[in-house]
Image: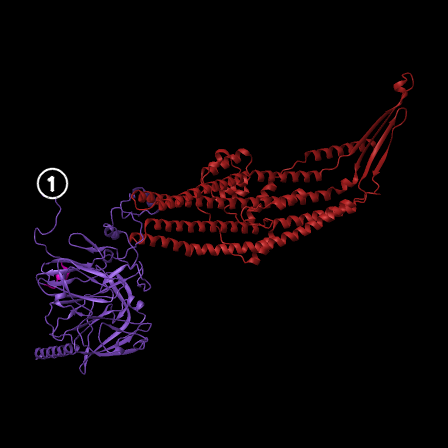
Amino acid sequence: MKHKSTLLLIKIVLVLIFFTLNSLGTSNPSYTPVITPDGSTLPYKMVDGVKVFHLIAERVKREFAPGFFVDCWGYNGQTPGPTIEAVEGDRVRILVTNKLPEHTTIHWHGLFLPNGMDGVGGLTQRYIDPGETYLYEFDLVQHGTFMYHPHADEAVQMALGMEGFFVIHPKTPPYKVDHDYAVFLHMWQIPPGTSKPNPNAMFDFNYFSFNSRVYPGTAPVLARENSLIRVRFANLSMESHPIHIHGVSFKVTATEGGDIPESAQRPTTTVNVPPGTVKTIEFVPEYSGDWPFHCHKAHHAMNAMEHNLPNMIGVNQTNADKKIQKLFPNYMSMGTNGMGDMQDHSEHMPGPKNTPPMMMGKGPFANISMGGMFTVLKVRKELTPDSASTWYDHPPGTVSRKVDIEEDGK
Amino acid sequence: MNPLKRKILNYFIIISLVIVSGCKTYRYEADLMNVKSDAMMRLSAADDMDFLTSHPNDDNEVNSIIGKILENELTLNSAIQLTVLNNPELQASFEKLGIQKAELMQAAILPNPNVHIDRMESHSGRFLPHARQYAQIHWSVSIDLLDLLSKPNLAKISRAQVEIAKMRLTNQLLDKINDVSKAVHNFLYEKKHLNLLEEIFEGSEAKLELAIEQHKAGNISDLDLVEQEMEYQNDKLNVNGQQYKTLVAREKLNRLMGLWGTMTEWVMHSEFPRVKEINLTRSELITSAIERNLEIAAASYEINVYKRQHSMNKAMIIPSFEFGVSREKEDGHDPTSGRSVAFELPIFDHNQSETNRLSAMIQKQEKEIRAISINLRSQLKLLHALYTGLRKKLTYYENAVLPIRKKYLSLSERHYNGMFIGPYELLDVKRSELEAQQDYDRILRDYLNAASDLNHALAGGYAGGSGMFTGDVKTSNVRREKDSGH
């Protein structure tokens, strides 16, 4: 008797979960849901046939990398804000509550909508003052990858992390991808030892992030061998970012302006994402492995560093070291033979608080010595729950090795 | 009394007076001990300056004590001990006490009697050998009665002058203790400053070394290298200049401690001495310093002496009055004897100029006391403000400035480790930390000097002049002039 009642209870709970999930729209067989690595998707409620979302603009503490916390502004406790996902033809109602200390608005970057819903403070609407909630409601008449961000004090608000994806799936997708990822590119000036991005910065940014995370805080991108992968890149930072992915060739299939005809798509391994744009790429990974996925501006794949350091490459610092060590007994010179040993150095020489070393990350063979806009595309024959946390198991004879040039180099 | 008895009595009196007068000798060591004890008591330093109460017997003992002191690192106390033992000016001043004591003895000695003897012969005896000859002998003894009567008063004046001399000697001793204290503080500061400049120079050397290597590697321009060389040169010259300043400070100490030759190879403990805080309000300080001021006390004593001299002078209408006995014997006649009196008739000179001089001296001293008192009050106000201001500044440096500089240095090391600053900037941060330490040392030296001046003032010392209590102002000029004026 007791057993039966327990089963009944489980059934009721399951039914409730099903209906709740259905009403929140978390499942839709027509498209593959977008995965925002290190982020989330904004839930909605169906109210009289309208998808109702609620964004809350507020202060956010974001862990960019293990132990490195940044005081940002964002939406619903995160930066970038949760991804809004809908389908072409939907009517959406988006409530925006302002919990910031100053007014804000939300602009729906790239969307066709009534002018009064465009979210430009002062021009198309009144500002949303702190404590107020505004309603945006419109029909989605297009599909593609778009962005949302404030159009009020935007230099400050975007610099502090207020941005998010707005993905509109086609009503009738011509095909379905296996994995659909969304990666927001951003750059920050966070002086060493601080936690607040400096919104006054126009140049000399020192952190470059994927979804407001820097390596080794960035989540890996997982892909099954021979599956169809889509990655949507959005950029609201001050510079362009040439994103390069090892081990695959891809095509840019869409921008924030719409789909690119197949005839105009060309294969590449690097896509440049300028400020204010979205680039969507698709590829089929054929080769398993741990493939770097990074911005190809060299300093964008490193964490904070000072750009006005004296150039010590090739400088014999031996005598100076002895003299400086009289004043600083723990002093160690750096940079004579490059900065490759900086990561080892940083492990026993503490740097400023709340500041990750310039180069980080442990690989299966040695230090990875990267940072910033860097992650790993993990291609596996089959994805398993531990694919994200394990290194690629190289087949014998496929890893570069040290040789004796006289014996083995013949 | 028969003539024989009278003769015997007269001879006894004369012999006794001679013996008493001849046996009178003077010793001033006890007075010197009083001076040193007084100085020690006034400095409230009974525990750590007990050497002031000892007085070596001879030069050998002095040299032995000096040798023992110099075997160890010098401290403020041992420098003071050496100065008290060996400062040549101070030793010469100690002898002044002997001079004053000799004058006191002189005042107590009875005046010598005047003896007058005549022998007269007839002229015929010399030129006419066959004529009758005769001779006449006359002698007399007299003494100045007024001189005799003024002896007790003169002795009182001399005793007062000995007391005045002791006060001034105590003052001079306090001056020297203050001078040597400040000289020690200054030497320690200059030495520390030299060490810090040497450390800064080490940083410059390292920076130049780096710049040379960077230049060799083609990483910096000729201009960048020259800039570094200029900094190096400046810092080298700073060290050189400071070496001389340290030598100057050392030699000042040598002069104060009376050292020369191999004795000047002493080593001093490198840390500044600790001093007790002086927690007196400004009015308490002024009241106490004025009450105990030795110069005011000595000047007041002098006024009493002048007043006593003035009274004596006025009372002595007749400048001298001699009384004596005489006897005359002429050949062929019985001897004759009698009493004699001799005195000045005060028709023109009745001592009015001396009386006026003494009146003027009294007026002068009273006005000088007023001047000292006003100067002292004003300067003590300044000194109190200086001392309390420096103490606050020192506390601020200890609790805020230095810890922040250390933190700045430590955080900069972390920024260096993170490659957010380079070695040049790191060395500049070290330089700024050392410069803050220099500022602190200078403030500490000034504070210790101000404390020394305060203790000096509270002990009754007086510096005089408008620049008292600061730096190297000679503190005893006014007093020396006064010493030579009477």
Alpha-carbon neighbours of circle 1 within 10 Å: few (<14), some, or many (≥20)?
few
Residue lying at 64% horizontally and 50% vertically, measured from the top left: B296
Whether residue A227 sits left or right of residue A43 in the image: it is left
- Where is residue A261? Give x, y as percent: 14, 68
Q: Residue furthest front?
A: A263
Is most of the magenta stretch helix, strand or loop?
Answer: loop
Quadrant assignment, res A172: bottom left
Q: Would you say residue A164 sits in the magenta stretch?
A: no
Quadrant assignment, res A111: bottom left
Whether residue A167 sits left or right of residue B441 in the image: it is left
Chain B on-screen colour: red
Chain letter for the residue marked with disc 1 in the picture: A
- Where is residue B281? Give x, y as percent: 54, 58
Q: Secondary structure at mark 1?
A: helix
- In the displayed structure, would residue A214 be above or below residue B317? below
Residue lying at 89% horizontally and 19% vertically, measured from the top left: B125
Q: Quadrant of the N terminus of chain B?
A: top right
Residue assigned mark 1: A406
Front in this rendered view, residue B418 or B97? B418
Front in this rendered view, residue B23 or A117? A117
Q: Which chain is assigned purple?
A: A
Q: Would you say residue A388 sits in the magenta stretch?
A: yes
- In the displayed structure, would residue A148 be above or below residue B157? below
Front in this rendered view, residue A199 or A169? A169
Q: Amino acid at mark 1?
A: Glu
Q: Which residues are magenta?
A: A383-390
Q: Quadrant of the C terminus of chain B?
A: top right
- Where is residue A69? Give x, y as percent: 27, 63
